[in-house]
Image (cartoon, grey):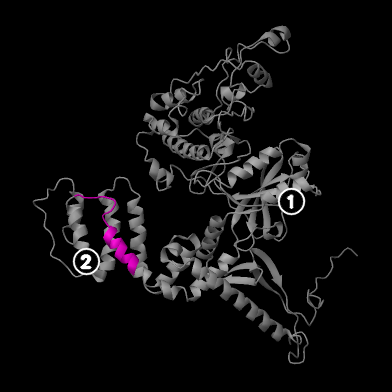
Amino acid sequence: DHSPPVPCCPRNGTKIGSSSFIWPNFVMAGGIMALEVYPESKDTSKSSSSSPRPGRKREDRRRSRRVSKSVAIRADAYRMRFSEFESMFKHKLGNYFLKEYLREHHQSDCLDFVNEVDKYRRIVQPTPSDLRVVLASLRRIALIEQDENENDQLRNIQQQSSHDQRHPSPRRCRYGLPVDHVLACVALGKLHAGLFDECYDRVMGVLRSFYPSFLKSDSFLRFVRCMSYCRTIKQSDLRVLKCLGFGAFGRVLAVEKRDTRQLFAMKEISKVSLRSNRFSWMCKNEMEVLTMTNSPFVLNLKYAFHDKTAVHFLFELCTGGDLLAHLQRAPFSLGQVRRCTTEIAIGLNHIHSLGWCYRDLKPSNIMLTESGHCKITDLGMCLRLPKNGVVQKHVGGTPGYWSPEVLAGVGNFAASDYWSLGVLVYNMITSRNFPDPLSEKRPSRRREREAYKAFKPWSPFTKTTEDKQRALKDPTMKYIDATVNLPEDITGPVRDLIEQLLVVDPVKRLGGEGGFERFQRHPFFRRVDWKKVERQESKPIFIPQKVVFKRRLLFPPKIETRGKRMDFSPIRDTSAEKRTYDKFMFTNEDAFYDEVVESIQHGKGNKLKLDGDDGPCVIC
């Protein structure tokens, strides 16, 4: 008989289909479709399963008292830590719960005004359009209506003189806000960053008056419990959704965090590979750099942990794909090239400011977010920049993208990354690799063996291993051929940008002497507002197609190896390895706070359940 076994109830073994069984209900548990079955009971009053076991209520009451006491102790500690309003207002997680409390007390208009003024202060050159939003928010707080001639004043700020302004008569405004003074400054064209300072301080004083009651509220207790659950994670906290790709020593998986239901990209590096190869230093360097990075254009580390099989890094999941996939479809427009180059350069400058050289800039290492912004990934090739005369001469990177000084073993510098950026700009414009200038000059390896061995010229654009060996024998770069032959349709500032980035001498190269500031002043970026781009306030040129992952999985997906030999066998760490791997236990607190806030905001009515030492913390 090959018929499938009859499923039974997990509680008492009742067979599905029998008279004592009722049909199950489908429930959602952590994004997984699950079955919840309940056996039918004829006499619930006499059923032993319906009544709690002896002492259960007493045990629950004791545990509840212990949890309440623990939360109360932590709440007192956090009240001392966040005794000032500003400390809570600047904290990412505290800011969310404080604002929710203030909105419950009908202070939404004050919060909106504070947010708009903060945005206004960051603008280098405010315009009348920037003022309209702030003034509208200010009017709502002061409970006054808009003047009839205010729009005309905003349109003609630069044309009006101080003699023909009509100053409005003083009005009584709520909270004593000096609205008339602000409007008078606007009429005179005084659009300075401190225009709303006095109004801002008075509104903050109003919000500050609610802080003592907030410290005694349920909102503050929810904040305390969330703060208590920021901890390192483990494999059981995650659920694998899909395999995204493979590398030299590991793979990248799309995973879901069970408590907050947030998606991450998890990079797994096999411990077997780390032990058998001599590249464990790359993993250490990557971890060291990732714990320091904090840039919107570098893929920042969220969590890190290790188990018996591998070292795991969790990053933001970029659903827009990598740059290589987009370039394989079609080249970018000049606007797209300018925006991507700007964001990548800001990310590179951030890595350089930490004292590291990236060394592996290429299209496949640039990921696009859902909103179309670029993020630099895979920092395993990073090396320290020269310091106190010590120059790292290790040759590393990707053939065709590494700079001449790296290939020749001269050293790794910040300007080396700008060479790779020049090659990448060419890739984005043409959707092709940079041409090899020695392709027609190089003797045939099979037909002309003697001439091939005696051949000394080499090029950084060549992808053959023989050119790497020739370059290492030529540290003075006497035989280098780095001829830049650009197509005729590449003209104007972008052509000059590529030519200046692909200068052999790293000192004369754009980004070398003068650094990032000199790079920003290039004519190709003449109309770029670098501060606005860095704050991600400018609209992206294009929005990539979003990748959607199936979350409702009844069974874990099968991870295909695609011919790659991946050995994720469990091993026992040596004492030295254990000391090293223990440094890989990492939690980015700010990322956790953002994760919790996003889960609450986009939970669509679902409760957020965080498991901790004191039991589950349920946040509505």
In-image side of 324 versus 153 (left or right): right
Which residue occupies the foreground of this view, 160 or 494?
Answer: 160
Q: Is residue 605 visible?
A: no
- The residue lying at 67 percent from left, 71 percent from top is 26
Kindly identify which residue carries mark 2: 145
Q: Secondary structure at mark 1?
A: loop
Three-letter amino acid code at the position of disc 1: Lys
Q: Secondary structure at mark 2?
A: loop
Q: What's the CA distance linking mark 2 and mark 1?
A: 63 Å
Determine whether label 2 and label 1 are within 8 Å by CB.
Answer: no
Residue 151 rendering spot, x and y as whole percentages:
20, 55
Q: Residues within 10 Å of mark 1 (few under 14, many from 20)?
A: few
Is residue 468 positioned above or below 608 on the image? above
Nearer to us of marks 2 and 1 is 2
**111 magenta-colored:** no
Which residue occupies the foreground of this view, 361 or 602?
Answer: 361
**What is the quadrant of residue 105 in the picture?**
bottom left
Seen as rendered, the residue at the extreme front is 388
Is residue 535 positioned above or below 211 on the image? above
Magenta stretch? 189-205
Three-letter amino acid code at the position of disc 2: Glu
Seen as rendered, the residue at the extreme right is 1
Q: Residues within 10 Å of mark 2 (few under 14, many from 20)?
A: few
In-image side of 358 versus 160 (left or right): right
Kindly identify which residue carries mark 1: 558
